[in-house]
Image (cartoon, rainbow, N blue to C red):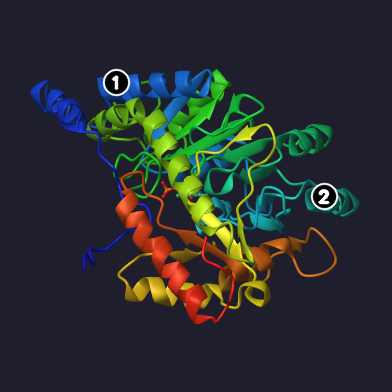
């Protein structure tokens, strides 16, 4: 039996990456910055339908720059989605600011406008509104940006849209990442396209973008000698990696279609297993389905996420629970958290019931059948009499 390891979301090269890298070598643009960086920024901005992009060394760096540009400093508050990877919130700590976590709502699994409104009203009472709201688009699914934007506009709080997982997704016809004052992409190895490591900050605010480039290159003042009057960072993407990014961007639409097809195949295969629910897709939105995620209601299904994870692991298949909410992380136990409703937070339930299945765009139908078969086996062992789909 073929037992080759199946990964959750491995890099998927197009074959053209080498051409771009060779071009960089041949023109000796090995130094950071260079023509690929400029072209990559322009192509990204065009793709996202926004004025400009700054290519940086990671998505985390892009979030950090956005906070710097918004003047977030020690003692300030920043609101952030709780159901996300820690990289969404770490830069708040870099600035010595205080993260406040906002629960998910069930339709998108993303930031609950209801919990956000409560947090904002409370902040007004306490006389300390946040300096920014970081909204995450989980697993490719765009958050309820209409409601969230309306609230943030009312209180005049800028939005940083963490679109690290949702490059190429749309909401009401607009590209993910283009809703906030700043948008953030990641090209880490596990994302829908990759530069092995990298990220981008996008915005319609030209002045902020040129300031981002300044801060990301050690805040060097214009002078023939090295002159610095502010603290900066070394955050720019190298010309070599930008070349990889250009080749990857060309195949992004194919990658989205592949991931959506993988999602559909899982959905068709698992729809008749009781207690399983696929991550929903918001009306008027189009998700890149970066990872296929679903919840398992143990009482209805007769088996748990843990059992599926361990069965998959035995078959040499990588799968994961959904992100552990940040308000449950030891790092953030002292930070405030606003729940969607009075009972158990939505993000807690999603964490306990959620599972991410192998979703890489290079996953073959045969490999996917192995994953599905393994889940069927767990279901059969659970002793259900329901017919297999
Ligand atoms: C991957 C990711 C990031 C961080 O991106 P890096 O490029 O790895 O720094 C930030 N937020 C979310 C939601 C992510 O999934």
What residue sits 52% from the left and 64% below the top? 355
What residue sits 47% from the left and 45% below the top? 290
**Residue 169, quarter of picture:** top right
Q: Position of 129 compared to 45: left or right?
A: right
What residue sits 68% from the left and 31% below the top? 284
- Measuring from the top left, give residue 143's x and y in whole percent: 66, 42
Residue bearing mark 2:
114
Secondary structure, mark 2, is helix
Query: Does residue 333 show up?
Result: no
- Measuring from the top left, give residue 63's x and y in whole percent: 52, 43
In front: 269, or 65?
Answer: 269
The alpha-carbon separation of the residues under discs 1 and 2 comes to 53 Å
Secondary structure, mark 1, is loop
Tell me the crowding category of disc 2: few under 14, some 14 to 19, or many 20 or more residues within 10 angstroms, Cα based: many
Q: Between disc 1 and disc 2, whose residue precedes?
A: 2
In front: 305, or 76?
Answer: 305
- Quadrant of the rendering where the N terminus is positioned: bottom left
What residue sits 78% from the left and 37% below the top? 147
Residue bearing mark 1:
224
Nearer the observer: mark 1 or 2; the answer is 2
């Amino acid at each position: 039996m073929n037992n080759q390891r199946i990964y959750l979301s491995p890099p998927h090269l197009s074959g053209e990456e080498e051409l771009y890298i060779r071009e960089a070598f041949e023109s000796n643009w090995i130094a950071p910055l260079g023509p690929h960086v400029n072209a990559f920024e322009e192509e990204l901005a065009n793709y996202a339908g926004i004025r400009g992009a700054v290519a940086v060394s990671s998505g985390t760096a892009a979030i950090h720059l956005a906070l710097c540009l918004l003047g977030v400093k020690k003692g300030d508050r920043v609101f952030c989605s709780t159901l996300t990877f820690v990289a969404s919130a770490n830069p708040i700590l870099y600035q010595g600011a205080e993260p406040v976590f906002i629960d998910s709502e069930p339709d998108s699994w993303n930031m609950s406008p209801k919990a956000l409104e409560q947090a904002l009203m409370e902040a007004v009472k306490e006389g300390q509104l946040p300096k920014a709201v970081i909204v995450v688009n989980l697993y490719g699914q765009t958050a309820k940006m209409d409601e969230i934007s309306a609230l943030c506009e009312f209180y005049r709080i800028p939005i940083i849209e963490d679109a690290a997982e949702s490059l190429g997704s749309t909401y009401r016809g607009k590209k993910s990442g283009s809703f906030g004052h700043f948008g953030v992409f990641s090209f880490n190895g596990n994302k829908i396209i990759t530069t092995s490591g990298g990220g981008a900050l996008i915005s319609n605010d030209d002045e902020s973008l040129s300031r981002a480039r300044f801060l990301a290159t050690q805040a060097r003042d214009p002078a023939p000698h090295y002159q610095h009057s502010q603290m900066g960072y070394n955050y720019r993407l190298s010309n070599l990696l930008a070349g990889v990014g250009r080749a990857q961007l060309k195949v992004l639409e194919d990658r989205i279609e592949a991931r959506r097809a993988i999602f559909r195949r899982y959905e068709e295969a698992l729809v008749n297993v009781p207690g399983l629910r696929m991550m929903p897709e918001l009306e008027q939105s189009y998700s890149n389905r970066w990872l296929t995620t679903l919840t398992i209601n143990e009482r209805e299904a007769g088996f748990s996420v843990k059992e599926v994870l361990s069965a998959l692991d035995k078959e040499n298949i990588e799968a994961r629970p959904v992100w552990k909410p940040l308000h449950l992380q030891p790092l953030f136990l002292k930070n405030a958290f606003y729940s969607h409703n009075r009972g158990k937070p939505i993000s807690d339930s999603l964490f306990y019931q959620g599972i991410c299945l192998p979703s890489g765009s290079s996953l073959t139908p045969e490999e996917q059948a192995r994953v599905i078969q393994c889940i069927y086996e767990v279901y059969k062992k659970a002793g259900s009499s329901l017919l297999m789909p």
